[in-house]
């Protein structure tokens, strides 16, 4: 069976390509899903991309990933900086977790400089645009075969 990678996205990422394109670019989340699916196939992986504006839903997806997914790529959006609950949920997942941010959160407002999720993440990719998702998949492929 091909290992499943969950790609989980938090609030406002449904507006990717429309919201602040000078920061987040013009690619949509559908573009990200398509590109990740294509890359995953070359890496011997499968992907499932989901997005929610509801914190509890993201936590439920993390819980569902236990025992079904080999790894998680997560862009928690603004919850990165506020949600201990998402950190706690990620701590229940045994596989590798890669945190992705489209923008460089360290070059933005001071409140964005701290990430609760980073305490659990095996790697953090920030400031690479939507390419960060593909970089995360490549890193997960390496971690899963090590």
Image (cartoon, helix red, strand yellow):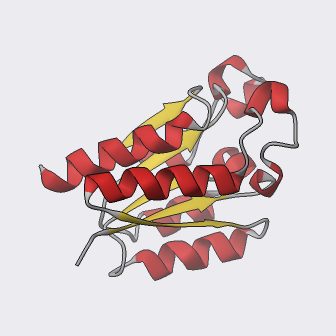
Q: Report x, y in % for residue 5.
A: 40, 64
Task: Mark yes or no: residue 83 visible.
Answer: yes
Q: Residue furthest top?
A: 107
User: Is residue 41 depicted above or below 80 in this figure?
Assistant: below
Q: Quadrant of the N terminus?
A: bottom left
Q: Residue at x 25, y 60 (%)?
A: 44
Residue 120 in view, yes or no: no
Task: In this rendered view, identify the residue nearer to me: 94 or 12.
Answer: 12
Residue closest to the eye, 12 or 44: 44
The image quadrant of residue 55 is bottom right
Image position of 36 (left or right of 57): left
Q: Is residue 19 above or below residue 23?
A: below
Image point (49%, 78%), residue name: 63
Q: Is residue 4 left or right of residue 33?
A: left
Task: Tell me residue 28's x, y (percent).
Answer: 73, 48
Give the residue drawn at x 69%, y 17%: 107
Q: Quadrant of residue 56?
A: bottom right
Name, please, the residue furthest toward the left.
146
Horizontal and vertical percent position of residue 22: 82, 25
Residue 97 as seen in the image, left or right of residue 131: left
> Residue placed at 40% from the left, 71% from the top?
92
- Residue 116, placed above or below residue 48: above
The total of numbered circles placed on residues is: 0
The relative height of residue 58 versus residue 117 in the rendered view (above or below) is: below
Extreme residue in the right direction: 19
Residue 85: x and y, percent?
A: 61, 65
Whether residue 40 sits left or right of residue 11 in the image: it is left
């Amino acid at each position: 069976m091909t290992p499943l990678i969950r790609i989980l996205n938090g609030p406002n990422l449904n507006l990717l390509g429309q919201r602040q394109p000078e920061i987040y670019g013009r690619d949509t989340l559908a573009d990200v899903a398509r590109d990740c699916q294509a890359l995953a196939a070359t890496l011997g992986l499968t992907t499932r991309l989901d997005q929610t504006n509801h914190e509890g839903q993201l936590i439920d997806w993390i819980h569902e990933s236990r025992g079904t997914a080999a790894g998680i790529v997560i862009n928690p959006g603004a919850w990165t900086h506020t949600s201990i609950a998402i950190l706690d949920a990620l701590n229940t997942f045994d596989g590798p977790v890669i945190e992705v941010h489209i923008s460089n959160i360290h070059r933005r407002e001071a409140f964005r400089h701290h990430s609760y999720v980073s305490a659990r993440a095996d790697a953090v990719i920030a400031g690479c645009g939507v390419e960060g998702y593909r970089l995360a998949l490549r890193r997960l492929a390496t971690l899963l075969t090590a």
